[in-house]
Amino acid sequence: MQNIEIPIIDFLILLLSWSVILFGIVLAFVLFFKQNGRQLSHRILAMLLLVASFFLIDQLVRLTGLANQFNALWVLPIHFQLSIPPLIYCYLKFKLYPELYFKKQDLLHFIIPAVQAVISIFIGCSSLAFKTEIWYNGFLNTLYTIEDVTFAVLATIYGYFSFQLLKEKRRKWSAPLKRWAYQLLRILVAVLTIHVFLMMFYYYRPVVYPLLDYFHYLVLLSFLFFTVWKALDQYFPERIYQLSPLYTASPKTTTPDLDHQWFQSQTKRLFEEEQIFLNPDLNLALLCKAYGISKRSLSEYTQSVLGKNINELINHYRVDYVLKCLAEGQHHRYNILSIGYGAGFASKSTFYRVFKAATGCTPSEYISQLN
């Protein structure tokens, strides 16, 4: 059995890296199979986490010298980093526009990454003799150069279009969501810019700088760490929408009538005036912050005052919003699924199930009756 020789600094980097990498991979699988919420944006974010994790693994085995000690690790079939820029753009697109769905033309974003993936898997799964041959004849080095230049170009293009997406004036997002998206994009673009700059520096001054190599790797590790940190917001949307109680607190009284009157007025303002139900990330924690009361109190008020549970309350307003849109004839300009997502529903199945339970027919049947 071959002994592994790793300097202490590399051993510490291995421990730190694998803790982030493993957490990122586990979170990616959890997000990919998450049933509630907007599944498309979750799955795109899961793919981004996987690609970033694989790219970091490849860089890690090179930095720590494991690739020199184990020839099988020399060229790994996990070079998919060209998909990172289009994945960031697509994630923001489907996160900000939950009514959209993946179309055939969206596949065009991933033609170049798909070519890289095929080549990477082919070379990575080939024999050691073949890898050695293409290394010494210069093909592998040329391929890496092309990948680096292409990555810089894609990062520039998709960074520009991502910022343009956030500047779109036809759509008004909530201020917290827009602020969160800007923060996400700015940090990711800043990290990728440093990565591209360091790649260009290596080409112009091909001298070994050990400290610079470690700094470059930590930049890549920070990209994965920040992506993992922001991915947790998909499970805790209250971290995105940092609400404080919007209205006056509940009266300090034991008189039920006053408490019920307060809750009814707050519900009317939140759901009818503020239309908080249009937020696809709306959950119990967010509602409690908006009302300024505990989860238990909110559940009790909803049942005693309105005769509904919290989900029924939210879905009631969302269905009512869809019915108003249909009555205005919006189904002539938008498909029914877009209207459902615009009302705050986070998935097609939930929208159809709730709509049929409320109206006794599917959205298509309801439109036929209107016609």
Image (cartoon, rainbow, N blue to C red):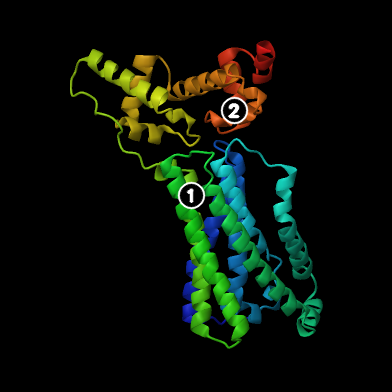
Residue 136's image quarter? bottom right
Q: Residue at x 63, y 82 (%)?
A: 203
Circle 2: is it few (<14), some (14-19), or many (20+) Cα within 10 Å? many
Q: Position of residue 62 (x, y in %)?
A: 61, 77
Q: SS at mark 1?
A: helix
Image position of 80 (left or right of 28): right
Viewer-nearest residue: 14 or 46: 46
Q: Position of residue 113 (x, y in %)?
A: 71, 60
Sooner in the amino-acid sequence: mark 2 or mark 1: 1
Q: Furthest-front residue in view?
A: 169
| Quadrant that contains the N terminus | bottom right
Q: SS at mark 2?
A: helix
Question: Do labels 2 and 1 touch, CB within 8 Å?
Answer: no
Identify the residue position indicated by label 2 in the image.
339
Q: Amino acid at mark 1?
A: Ala
Viewer-nearest residue: 168 or 231: 168
Residue 40's image quarter? top right
Identify the residue position indicated by label 1 in the image.
181
Image position of 301 (left or right of 88): left
Q: Residue at x 59, y 86 (%)?
A: 205
Q: Furthest-left residue in view?
A: 253
Circle 1: is it few (<14), some (14-19), or many (20+) Cα within 10 Å? some
Viewer-nearest residue: 181 or 259: 181
Q: Amino acid at mark 2?
A: Ile
